[in-house]
Image (tube, helix red, strand yellow):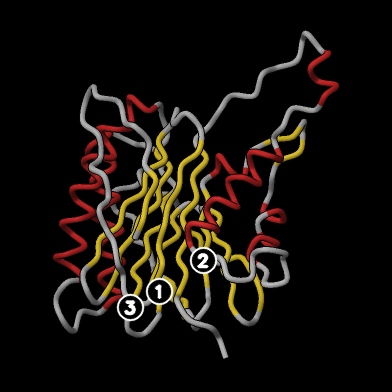
Amino acid sequence: MKSSEPDLAATGRSPRRMELEGLQGVDLHAEYHSVRTGGDFFDAVDLGTHVIFLLTDIAGTKEATQPIASEVQRIFRGSAAELLGPAGTNVMDATAQLAQAVNHELIRAAKGVRFAPTFLGCYDLALGILAYVNAGGLTAVFHDSEGARILTSASVPLGLFTHLTHEPAMQAFEPGAKLLLVTKGVMETRHGRTHFGVERLIPLMQDAAPGFATQSATELCLAALKAAEEFKQVPWYSRLNPFGHRQEDEDLTALALVRHGTAG
């Protein structure tokens, strides 16, 4: 797994950098663009048989969310190994328990309610099957031989209710299948009054798209963020309006998972 992390502020606690390389049979990558003004955070754990990953968008400023993300990372890594490491584990039950552990830690570390749409996935490296919880409906686009489509099964965001449980969904990855996740900073990127929207992500996943027939996870992330950055270019006429409102920069974050091989 490869990651492109921002230079986190030296003040206060901050999440540790991911150091995962050489996953067998799968390509996993996450990428940030922007000045990291908010609480986008991703992490992953390689357990040998499974890779567990998390992408969350914690409400608040960078300064407020970094200590929370650091505590969430600690619980995520420890609980992932404890719940999903043992042989014979029921992956669906363990994924649900992991989501609950992360949720409890978010609320505890934030000292109260903290809105945090979160995608939590457990990918079986041998079987090519993903168990996942999409708490809060982060945009998830999946592509295989049947085409590109949105992964549904969204549930309530993390960070709101301590006793809420989440029921994982399951998605099989045939060789060559790929998943792209983006946070709301990408989806809400605007050109004038028009939002970027999922309809601009799906073409990036299609095999027919020029230059994107064999994307790696890195290429998918970069293509999604590049498309969002290019989309929000300020129209020439808005520069002539002295009363126009400046669009605030937000975190733009993408995470992609690609199974090696070719569907056939």
In primary-sequence order, the first of circles 3 and 2 is: 3
Image-quadrant location for residue 239: top right
Estimate how packed mark 2 is, as few (under 14), some (14 to 19) or many (20 or more) residues with alpha carbons within 10 Å. many
Q: Secondary structure at mark 2?
A: strand
Which quarter of the figure is the N terminus placed in? bottom left
Q: How far is disc 1 from disc 3 in space, using C-alphas? A: 9 Å
Relative height, residue 127 to residue 1 (above, below): below
Which residue is depicted at the point 76% across and 38% down?
Answer: 194
Q: Amino acid at mark 2?
A: Leu
Classify mark 1: helix, strand or loop.
Answer: strand
Residue picked out by circle 2: 179
Determine the residue positioned at 36% across, 42% down: 5
**Residue placed at 70% from the left, 17% from the top?**
245
- Label 3 to label 2: alpha-carbon separation: 15 Å
CB contact under 8 Å: marks 1 and 3: no
Q: Tell me the tag on residue 130.
A: 1
Please indicate whether residue 143 sits to the left or right of residue 237 in the image.
Answer: left
- Mark nearer the viewer, 1 or 3: 3
Q: Position of residue 3 (x, y in %)?
A: 37, 51
The residue singled out by tag 3 in the image is 125
Q: Position of residue 79 (x, y in %)?
A: 18, 59
- Give coordinates of residue 101: x percent, y percent: 23, 55
Mark 1, Cα crowd under 10 Å, few <14 / some 14-19 / many 20+, is many
Residue 52, x across and y down, in percent = 30, 64
